[in-house]
């Protein structure tokens, strides 16, 4: 900018000074505006690139004990975790557009959705237990079909209760015998709804989960309370088998199945060393240092189940399940025995 000199009146020189100062100020402000605009453009671009590059998984029904655990573990690995749930804090089941958007470009879908079976099996509860699994599975399958870039892996929860009451031999994926009754009907219909979908871009795995053990959730709280109050003896005959799995092994199994891209179909999701009920309760008493454990005969369990609004099947059915396919595929359990699992959870 030119600077004028010469014999000008004081008034003219004052006006010229004001003009020069204003010109400099405006240009500085313009420079600042340009810089700030560039910064905003950079931040927006960086944010979009981060969103595009961030690993993403979707957990349906992810607000329970298992879902919360998995969500936190995946976040520590750098994943963006999106939850689909009836809870209004997350994507709702009737919001099909957001469900499809969440699934598009996701690496994996884990479906845990379904009403808890810890209730009385009256007709209303039976209908809700079944429909909450079938309807949500169909919503997810339809959404995947509409995705331009669907998840490479869909893991759907199932249950080890699908097998018969087994006191004589363990149940494997290949040789296990499907049982009868309401719980089995739920499991078989759930798996059928899942595998009825033909998804060429998405690998499908159903996890027949045993009882999941972990800190502060699942069945551990009622078991711990029974032992604490001196009622931690055998339940029923104590001979019924208890198949179980540490929640950390569940997470590791999911990672293993994600990496082993040739695996699909049904997998028993249980530890390799199930125990009978009497051994389970004895292990709990030992770890909790409680010497007395009064037994609970079957008639008492049935009476108690009515009072607290649940079913004795959860305790008395003999679930003897082995994870043959996982072990044959090379998975190594971190907690293969009940004592190791309980020591980690309660020790």
Image: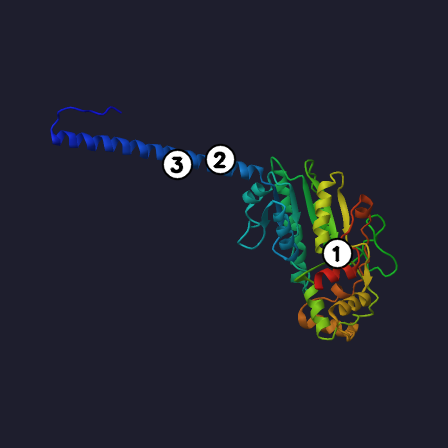
Q: Position of residue 129 (x, y in %)?
A: 67, 57
User: Quick check: 242 left or right of 124?
Assistant: right
Question: Would residue 34 appear left or right of 77 to someone viewing this image?
Answer: left
Upstream in the sequence, badge 3 or badge 2? 3
Q: Which residue is mark 1?
A: 245
Find numbered disc 1 in the image and state the secondary structure of the residue it sits on: strand
Left or right: where 327 falls relative to 158? right
Residue at 76% over, 65% down: 315
Give me the residue at 73% from left, 48% from top: 253
Numbered tag placed on residue 45 in the rendering: 2
Q: CA distance from mark 1 to mark 2?
A: 44 Å
Q: Residue at x 37, y 32 (%)?
A: 34
For this view, does 290 lie left or right of residue 71? right
Residue 50 location (% of width, % of height): 54, 38
Q: Which labelled disc corresponds to residue 36?
A: 3
Find the distance from the CA under tag 3 to the CA under tag 2.
14 Å
């Amino acid at each position: 900018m030119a600077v004028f000199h010469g014999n000008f009146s004081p008034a003219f020189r004052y006006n010229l000074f004001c003009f020069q100062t204003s010109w400099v100020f405006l240009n500085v402000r313009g420079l600042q505006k340009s810089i700030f605009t560039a910064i905003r453009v950079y931040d927006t671009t960086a944010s979009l690139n981060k969103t595009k590059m961030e690993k993403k998984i979707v957990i349906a029904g992810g607000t329970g004990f298992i879902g919360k655990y998995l969500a936190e573990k995946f976040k520590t690995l750098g994943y963006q975790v999106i939850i689909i749930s009836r809870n209004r804090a997350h994507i709702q089941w009737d919001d099909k557009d957001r469900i499809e958007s969440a699934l598009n470009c996701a690496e994996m879908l884990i479906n845990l959705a379904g009403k808890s079976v810890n209730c009385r099996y009256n007709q209303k509860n039976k209908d809700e237990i079944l429909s909450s699994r079938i309807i949500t599975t169909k919503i997810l399958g339809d959404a995947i079909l509409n995705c331009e870039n669907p998840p490479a892996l869909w893991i759907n929860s199932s249950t080890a209760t699908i097998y018969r009451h087994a006191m004589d031999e363990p149940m494997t994926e290949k040789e296990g015998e499907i049982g009868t009754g309401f719980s089995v009907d739920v499991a078989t219909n759930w798996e059928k709804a899942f595998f009825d979908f033909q998804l060429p871009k998405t690998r499908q795995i159903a996890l027949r989960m045993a009882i999941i053990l972990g800190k502060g959730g699942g069945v551990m709280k009622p078991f711990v309370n029974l032992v604490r109050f001196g009622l931690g003896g055998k339940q029923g005959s104590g001979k019924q088998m208890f198949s179980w799995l540490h929640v950390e092994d569940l997470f590791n199994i999911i990672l293993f199945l994600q990496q082993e891209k040739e695996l699909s179909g049904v997998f028993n999701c249980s530890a390799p060393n199930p125990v009978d009920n009497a051994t389970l309760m004895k292990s709990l008493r030992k770890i909790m240092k409680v010497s007395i454990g009064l037994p609970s005969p079957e008639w008492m369990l049935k009476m108690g189940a009515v009072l607290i609004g649940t079913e004795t099947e959860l305790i008395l059915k003999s679930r003897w399940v082995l994870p043959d396919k996982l072990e044959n595929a090379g998975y190594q359990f971190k907690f293969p025995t009940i004592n190791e699992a309980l020591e980690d959870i309660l020790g």
